[in-house]
Amino acid sequence: MVIQPMELLEQILFGLMIGGIYGVIGVGLTMIFGVMRLSNFAHGEFYMLGAYFTYTFVTLIGGDPFILAPLAAIAVGAVGIAINKLLFKSLYEELKEAKGAAAFYFQDLKFIMLTIGLSILFVDLALVLWGPIPISIPSPLTKHIIKLPGGLSFSLARLIAFVVAIATLVGLYAFLKFTKTGRAIRATAQNPSAAMLVGVNIYRIYDITMFLSTGLAALAGGILGPIYNVYPTMGLDVVAKAFVVVITGGMGNVIGSILAGFLIGLAESLGGLFLGTEYKQVVAFVIMIIVLWVRPEGILGGGRK
Amino acid sequence: MLGITKDVVTEISKYYLIALILLIPVPLAGDYITHVTILVMLYAVTAASLDILVGYTGRLSLGHAAFFAVGAYTSTLLAMNWGVSPWIGIFIGGLMASVFGLILGVPSLKLRGPYLAISSLGFGVIVWLMLINLDWLTRGPLGIPGIPPLPRIGPIDFRSKVAFYYVALAFTLISIFLLHLLTKSRIGKILMSIREDEDAALSVGVDVPLFKVYAFLIATFFAGISGGLYAHYLRYISPEISTLGESIYILSMTIIGGFGTLIGPVMGAAVLSLLQELLRSYLEYRYLIYGMLIILVMKFFPSGIYGIVQFILRKVRE
């Protein structure tokens, strides 16, 4: 098989674009794990809800999905906070009392089963509300094709999605690094009881983290909605990959997840080119297995075994 | 050596005798009930085998359907390509599932909690993708129809649901009895010590990695055999039996039933399968109710159906 250099370049660009989106989804998942020690198996469903909310806003209000996606993200973030308060808050309190490895394990199990239940519920809810048929969010930007010299071309929508993803990641990093709330989030991730001692209201931090995490997933869904199809089980297709990104980057490590997002996006794109599209899906998992074997704490470390 | 006394055997055997007597007349209730009960029993063994990992050893696995599928495909392919008798093929399928269990179990020895959950999830996805893409062997997403039934023994034809029912019943009771003995044995206690505190177990001289591998071998073996029986019963398999959804279905039986109790997962298999059947007419809202149930049980009865039953029994006694 001969691979044209242009084809290679095209796949690298596509890989980076998808990588940015993986980064946005992965960062949300890693934050929730780093701060609350919660493995959220419903993370993909917030991504799905983001896409459907954007679709609904576009049909109700009218306007471009790229402008309405942040609005949808805020709405989904509010759903996230509600779930956090209703379902998880009592578990955090139990977790504080937990002693011994087994107690933590049972808490993990409970979290995982609760989020699996949520995931099943949300998928069916979407099915009931929006129907099983894949839809596409209409946006004039998808028809606007940018042509680069050498025969490369992609839609403006893809470019905007990539720019939004990068801007979001930079914004999030700045927020965590430089604001007071951001510092409180990092403090809580490091040591919740110490954070409480210095006056951090950790339950408020948990709400904020949940809002950011689910909001980021929803934003990714909203900006990908015009490019790919939107359907009730779209979250299930993404959640496994989001976990791969998170593990590869080191669970709880924000920068690690961003890098891992790009790494996996690129590897998948190139894997599809060299191995054929049917094995594209396997690439991400193979990377994860290698990382777990060689460096279980993730490429940048920070993960807890 | 295993630390199983005669008392233990006689004590638990009586439950299995009662179960046997209760389950023998089921085929009288008609083909449909028999069919559902057979599936419940095969799922019950799979969920109980997963309990050895999740409930007893503290190893969360989200890829158990992969082992079920490996057993099913192994036995099917052996029977269809090499004419191996399914009676032997099913057993080899169990062993093959154990080999896959080693492939997942050994590299993931050091992983804990969510890390193991996600790597087992990834493993399950890889097996599923293999079944889909190796179409020269597995016919890909089309699946394999026309799988031979269990070969007849004398006049008994296992194409009939009733005859197969008794095979499944014997298999289920024996498997769960063996797993039950295992949990009462020294091995079972060591596995539980790993769950309670891995480091403490290590410090008192338990060969933790070895016993984790044992847990994987045992759990995957029974899942593989269930898969083999499933294949020769329905006589059609497809990669659908190895999806993440299927793994989650099995895990929810184990956890909603009450993990770490072995009998809980059996109850979980029965209740969830029954629920699926009952909700069939509500089609659209089926998973809404199903998801809600998982959330409610985890929120209010984390000890699962087994815990609820015990709670009720205690109230009745008082």
Image (spheres, coloured by chain):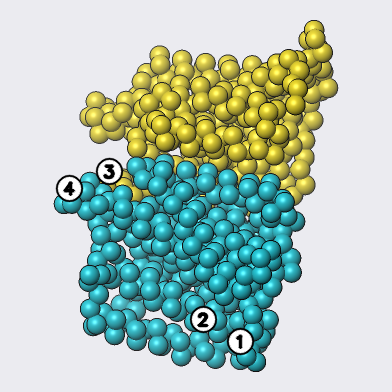
Chain colours: A yellow, B cyan
Residue B153: give its label: 1
Name the secondary structure under disc 1: loop
- Foreground residue among A178 and B186: B186
Give the structural element (helix, strand or loop) at label 3: helix
Q: Which residue is mark 2?
A: B169
| Other residues around mark 4 within 10 Å, as few (<14) / some (14–19) / many (≥20) | few
Query: Which numbered dot is residue A96?
Result: 3
Q: Is residue B300 visible?
A: no
Relative to residue A197, is residue B179 depicted above or below? below
Q: Do discs 2 and 4 share a chain?
A: yes
Q: Which residue is mark 4?
A: B203
Q: Nearer the viewer, residue B62 or A238?
A: B62
* B263 w.r.t. B218: above or below: below
Which is more foreground, mark 2 or mark 3?
2
Q: Label 3 is found on which chain of the structure?
A: A
Label 3 to label 1: alpha-carbon separation: 60 Å
- Nearer to the camera, A201 or B201: B201
Q: Nearer the viewer, mark 3 or mark 1?
A: 1
Going 31% across and 28% down the picture, which residue do you hit? Answer: A190
Discs 3 and 1 lie in a common subunit: no
Q: On the image, which quarter does residue A181 sit in?
A: top left
Frontmost of labels 4 and 3 is 4
Percent x, y of residue B292:
53, 58
Instruction: Identify the amino acid type marked 3.
Output: Lys
4 and 3 marks on the same chain: no
